Image (cartoon, coloured by chain):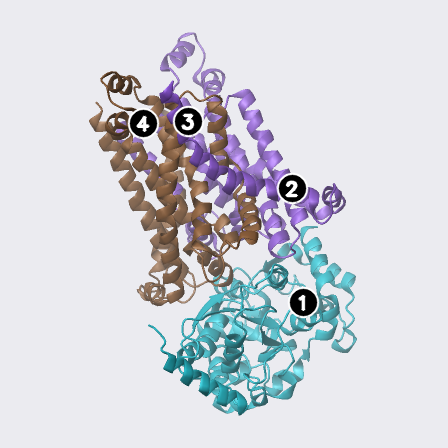
Amino acid sequence: MGGWRALRSAVCVMVALYLLAPLVIVVIVSFSAASFLRFPPPALSFRWYDNLFGDPGWMRSIAISIEVLIPASLSATVLGTAAAYALIRGRVPGASLILGCLMLPIVVPAIITGAGLYGVYRGLGLNGTRTGLIIGHTVLIMPYVVATVSASLRMMDARLEDAAATLGASPWAGFRRVTLPLLMPSVLSGLLFAMVVSFDELIVSLFISTARVRPVTVLMWSNVRGDFDPTIAAIATLCFVFAFFALLLEMIVRRRAGAEHT
Amino acid sequence: MTTTRRDILLGGTALGLAVAGGIPARAATDLKGKTVVFASWGGAYQDAEKQCYCEPFAAATGATVVQDGPMNAAKFRAMIAGGAPDWDVADITIDFLYAGIGDKLFEKIDTRLVHTDRLSPQFVNEYGIGCIVWSYNLGYSTKAFQPGSQPRNWADLFDLKRFPGKRALGDNVVATLEVALLADGVTPEKLYPLDVDRALKKLDTIRSETIFWSTNSQSQQLFVDGEIALGLILNGRAYDAAKKGAPIAISWEQNIQSIDYLAVPAGSRNRDAAMLLIDTMTEADNQAKLANLIAYSPTNPAAFKSIDPKVEPWLSTAPANVKQGFVINAAYWRDHLKPLQERWAMWKLS
Amino acid sequence: MKRIDHRIWLLVPPLLLLLVAFIGPVTWLLSRAFTQPAPGFGNFVELWEHPVYLRVIWNTLLISAITTPVCVAVGFPVAHAMTYANARTRRWLIFLVLLPFWTSLLVRTFATVILLQRNGPLNAMLLGMGIIGQPLPLLYNMTGLLIGAVQVLLPFVIFPLHASMMKIEPAYMQAALTLGADPLRAFFRVYLPLTLPGLMTGATLVFISVLGYFVTPAMLGGVRQLMVAQLIQDQIGQFGNWGIAGALSLILLLATAVLLGLLHATVGLKAVAR
């Protein structure tokens, strides 16, 4: 057994390195002074971050990413929570089928969703618009919220809400004062993840963006194909840092929720 | 940021007078608020174009220029077919210019707005204005090969014994077929029409050792990383890589000369602004600046005197280099680009 | 009875969005297969007749089939460690596995490009340790694609496996050992089958993901690793050929559906929430 244990630990360490090493390398390269991507860098410098922050093209794209992710993640969270609540607590015929349908955007390859939206948007003039991007992102991230909130609802004791109803609370008051507070951690968790997914979304955005209106991932993609300078590493590092803090926040939210419910 | 009637009248009057006088107007706030999308080949070249054409243009007119790319002939076509094209000015190769004219892909150049008289007449086309002259060269790593045993011509690229290591070619049928045929012993005079089957057969002999780069920047990166020992690379890109410290040199034997043009996609909604951007490109100073950055030769003869003598040996128009090369047959590609691109796609997967 | 009505109405906005922004567009795209450029099955005939398309489809299936077992093999020990290690190690492992998961695919794949370069850190390390004499060609080929894909897809295997493993009563293994089975046999005949739901879920998720892969083959693979998603994009973005794009999408979707169906039949579908 000891031999297997050691092997398992060795594999885990290697996998941990495998998963993290590339990210660490990108961060280091972003501070490289060299003009091409190379590791280890000959010297360190902030020049690529200067390049990034001084470039109106990048700044515009980052602004678009943020302008899209905020409405999209908020909408997805509201709609997703509503759907999860209705499906788990309500007595809806065919609930599991509907739940399955709501999960479809994750299962269907993004290339299909992207191409479909692009085709339909063409007739509506929604390509290269913030509205088009927001709608597309919302429908893509909604399933994550539905999954997270519904998992939480299933684990929650429905009798608490029944008790509230028995004591005379209206359905909305019951939801607002009993269910929602208990649900808050997973709603927040869903919201955070939704924000990250929207910020990282590439394939659908690639189809429905134009040079004038495109989120940062699309700009990164066209740069990575046509360009090899470490500015990409700088923006990649920023994306990674965003994800890092979002994840940290999410884990803290979960920890505190767990602690409250002992 | 409201434009008063006075501004509009002044601007309009200036424009009107100027156009009547046959001189393009460049009133300071002509294009404020307008966004022009410039599409090119990415990397160091597009950065240079941004610096030398787009920024002076933006400074003079108040317009915003957005960079996009990389340029892709098929994508260009699809954009036109789809309606309002996303790009306002595109940097295209001569083969695509000729092919595209037949398919009505470009707007006619507005000679009232563009100083076509500044350029040598061979670079002025009804639908595009030549911006740079360049060449396809054989590049090689100075680390992998010592002086005395360095590859010199395309046959060396296909010689896996004398010049071992991975090589690179562009993921593009243009020039690759020519290179293969030249390596197989065909002389430039007998090259066209291309014997496609023979070229593909020759390419089969090295394909397992070849990386096909999809962008010019990738061709540079491959040399920088040492992923390849030798390969096809554009002269300007090689210069840029060498300037940045990569161990690369190029041979001028059998170089294939070509020209890039700036054109406006048909149906562009910023036609006038696009034309003014092209006009900025024709200025001698801007062209010289670009040549000094990335060793692509100007089309405005007045620009040559401002080019750094250090850059001269890397220019495809240097007399010693022109002698060793030949000009790509754009007329051939006008007629064969589309079908051969499809054949290339098939060959890649076989 | 009134309360049930209220709650059903909550479903209307989300389902409406789903219909308008997802089901509608996807159906539209798939319908192009039968309507562009002319009504009928012409596109499928063309797919069958041109070897390129079939080769890319086959290529895609092959790449998925290779990546999936590798992913499962690498992920299994990690899921195991996550389940049976102490709480602190488990938290670290979860964070370590989640972090790449929350980082954009593009960033991770780009990072892998730098890692795998000829003069890059991985080759440098292997050379330095004397394991190899020459730098390995790890980029622009199947190897690079595999390395990049597994790195991105590991969480999809680890989390379902972990969930399954958590449910296994230690008593089962104890019983097997007490009854005289050696550890290896006990593992293969008792433990492994009990992890099957998680394992199948993870494997299916990986396979489906790789089927639709776009970014990874483009950045890490060579020209021979062209996959269906890139082909669909080319058909639309470069050739305006919506008919073929629709037909290819339909095939891709059918393959995905078949796999999910298999999963449901063997294990039963449950919302796999992270």
* Chain shown in brown: A
- Cα separation, mark 4 vs mark 3, equals 44 Å
Q: Amino acid at mark 1?
A: Val
Q: Amino acid at mark 4?
A: Ala
| Residue nearer the viewer, C158 or B148 | C158
Q: Is residue A11 above or below residue C139?
A: above
Residue position marked by numbered label 1 in the rendering: B174
Q: Colour of chain B?
A: cyan
Residue position marked by numbered label 2 in the rendering: C31
Name the front one of labels 1 and 4.
Answer: 1
The disc at residue C8 is: 3
Q: Amino acid at mark 2?
A: Ser
Residue B196 location in percent, x, y? 76, 63
- Cα separation, mark 2 vs mark 3, equals 31 Å
Q: On what subunit does the disc labeled 1 rest? A: B
* Chain shown in purple: C
- Cα separation, mark 2 vs mark 1, equals 36 Å
